[in-house]
Amino acid sequence: MATLREVPRVGRRLLNSASHPRPCTPGVLRYASTEATPPVVQDIEQDSGLSGPIVSREGTKIVDPRKRASRRKLELPHERYQFHAPKYYRGPLHPIQPPPSSNPIARDFEPGPFNLPRLKQTYHSTIASDIMTMMYQHTPPGTPDKPERIRLREWDDSSPYMKNRPKRGPRGSDVLFPLEKSITWQNIPEIRAVHIATYVPKAKSNFDHIIVGRAVLQSISGVRPTMTTTKSSVASWGIVKGDRSGVKCSIYGNQAYEFIDKVIHFVFPKIKEWEGLKGSTGDSTGNIGFGLESQDMQHFPEVEAAFSMYPAKMISGCRIILETTAKSDRHARILCQALGIPFYGKLVD
């Protein structure tokens, strides 16, 4: 049976070979292994490179790339272009959009973050949600909005000259403070910056006090401070306008959270009989301030580790201002209490 199956296959092959004759080249094919003389490959150059002509600058033709580009009629291929981010952001509907700030080619690119402060991580994971939950005030649907408090005073109609006058500021102060809005997920207060300043009145007689105060401030903040000068002259105190009287610096971002964490957990617990911050502190715009005496400066880990480097009698105290995104002192105190800063006395908003 197997022999009968093979018969059609053999017949098909014979028919195919007979219908498609293949040309046969006359002669005998020579293979590579039968060649008589193999090609010679020179591994070492016969001539030295020093024997070539020396090219001088006078004989070299220098082409200006700008002129060459101006004479070019066609544009370069697209793969030879380098993308430059637009200088201005012209809105979300503009056809050319700037890359995100995380892209290295963006104009506002900032490398990092290289660290994550413990206090900042605690704020985003716990404190922010707790503040939003505690400050939530439920408003039933359909409740009318409260009328906005009128803070600018109008003039009376006792004189015709007062008819078109602009409104006056609040009574007792010409400064119009921002309004306190309810805390939502959009305006949870957080730390924006920390400002540290030191006033050294003895710097007039001995400039070394400024040097020591600047060294201490730079060690505890990690930022190079700038010197401050007096704005006016006081003859009874011996102060002349323009004299160098202290140093100051500002900390932002992760450094601000690290500094506050250091003050809360290392400096405040070591101050004897420290009750907390006064309830009346604040500037009615969401900034909290407090001061440290000269003996409290040694509680910073940077100063305590190298206390022998600083003259003890020349170390001066400092004042610290916590700048927050809150619009009132009440919200700023809530943020500070959540971070671990207590308050005592009567709370003044």
Image (tube, grey):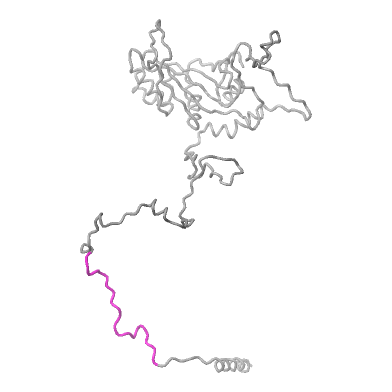
- Tell me where residue 107 appears, x and y as whole percent: 49, 41
The magenta stretch spans residue 145: no
How far across and down, in percent of the image, does residue 47 sit?
22, 68
Name of the residue lying farthest toward the top:
236
Task: State the residue in front, 217 or 17.
Answer: 17
Q: Position of residue 161 (x, y in %)?
A: 66, 11
Q: Residue at x 71, y 10 (%)?
A: 157
Tell which residue pokes out farthest to the left in this image. Answer: 51
Q: Above or below — where is 59 with respect to 165?
A: below
Q: Position of residue 218 (x, y in %)?
A: 40, 26
Task: Name the residue rendered at 47%, 31% in the picture.
Answer: 255
Horizontal side of residue 335 vs 249, given as left or right: right
Residue closer to the observer: 63 or 233: 63
**Apparent side of residue 244 relative to residue 191 in the rendered image (left or right):** left
**Quadrant assignment for the N terminus:** bottom right
- Residue positioned 77% across, 25% down in the render: 144
Q: Residue at x 57, y 91 (%)?
A: 16
Give the magenta part as a residue range. 27-48
Of residues 206 and 333, the one drawn nearer to the viewer in this rendering = 206
Q: Magenta part mainly helix, strand or loop? A: loop
Query: Up-down: is 156 above or below 258?
Result: above
